[in-house]
Image (spheres, rainbow, N blue to C red):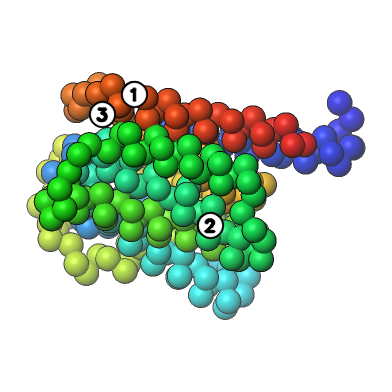
Amino acid sequence: MNNNDPKASALSAEQQSLLYLHIAIFLFGGTALFSKLVGLPALDITVYRTGIAAAALLLLLTLQKKQITLASAKDYGIAILLGVVVGIHWVTYFTSMQMSGVTVGLIAFFTYPVITVFIEPLFNKTSPKRKDIFIALVVVMGIVLLIPEVSFGNQVTMGILLGIFSATCFALRNILHKNYFSHYSGPHTMLYQTLVACLMLCLFIEVPPTQVSPIDWALLLLVGVVFTATPHALFASSLRHLSATTAGLISCLQPLYGSVLAFLLLHERPGLLTVIGGLLVISAAVFETWSVSKSK
């Protein structure tokens, strides 16, 4: 392969972004479990998680001797906006898991690829592609099969609604990042987003640091460094060469990882419809991965 070939370079960059994305999604799949494993309210988990992640990212950038400041006042404003959206997303995400369970919460959250398909064209002044709309419909079919029968007004229903709201925030964050903040590296942008989210929410914590148990601190360190700083940095890096729609659709593998881990660690047993719906979601993600690679 000719290393000077711009087409080959573009292909390599896109394949690397896909690799980053898949690793991030695997780690994301384990994040939901901490809503059940850590004995703290969702907001407290978010504050400690983002604080630990921000410290880890700051240490990483310092050791790598990378620039920490941003280029302009406008970029600081965008960083604050992204941090606020991310903070709201994470609080509602963990609350959804705690109210409806990991599997159902993940399914509700994964309406965000469908939301992205229809929001992103508003920023790019384009129309949704037929392929993306079709894949989004397949994902919706899978999600419908996965959601158990519930009645409005109960805790599970509220968890699903919060999951959908969290999905909207996440879709918006991805699109804003892609359009206005993707010129920064993944660790650089996530440093500011986690820091802003932590500072925004820290005044509302219910359990102060001195009252957090050693086991919960160990779990918070794990989720903050391995399941937050690492995958979000990889995810943000992948957006430099992939659209938010593509990233969102490939991320449909996350419910699979989360459901398997919930089965192994939390003993949440999926039914037949869950398996069928999961296969639909995974098929859509695999097809999107193949189509991105094939397009080059």
Please tell me which residue lies in front, 15 or 230.
Answer: 15
Give the mark nearest the N terminus, 3 or 2: 2
Which residue in the structure is indicated by mark 1?
A: 275
Asked which secondary structure carries label 3, the reply is: helix
Q: Earlier in the sequence, mark 1 or mark 2?
A: 2
| Residue at (89% x, 37% y) in the render | 5
In which quadrant is the N terminus drawn? Answer: top right
Q: Quadrant of residue 287?
A: top right
Could you tell me how far apart the alpha carbons at marks 3 and 1 are, in whole angstroms? 14 Å
Q: In the rendered view, tell whether residue 239 sits above or below residue 198.
A: above
Q: Position of residue 252 (x, y in %)?
A: 45, 37
- Looking at the picture, how far across and down is residue 239, in whole percent? 60, 49
Dot 1: within a 10 Å radius of its alpha carbon, few (fewer than 14), some, or many (20 or more) residues?
Answer: some
Label at residue 118: 2
The location of residue 255, given as percent across then percent down, is: 37, 34
Q: Residue 103, labelled with which disc?
A: none
Q: Circle 2 sits in a helix, a strand or a loop, which is it? A: helix
Q: Is residue 90 visible?
A: no
x, y percent for residue 170:
43, 55
**C-beta proximity under 8 Å, tags 3 and 2:** no
Instruction: Determine the residue positioned at 38% across, 53% down.
Output: 167
Q: Name the foreground residue: 35 vs 44.
A: 35
Position of the C terminus by quadrant: top right
Task: Say left or right for 138 vs 269.
Answer: right
Q: Residue at x 20, y 27 (%)?
A: 268
Q: Amino acid at mark 2?
A: Phe
Q: Which mark is residue 262?
A: 3
Of marks 3 and 1, which one's residue comes earlier in the chain? 3
Q: Residue furthest bottom?
A: 73
Q: CA distance from mark 3 to mark 2?
A: 31 Å
Identity, as a three-letter code, of the amino acid under mark 1: Val
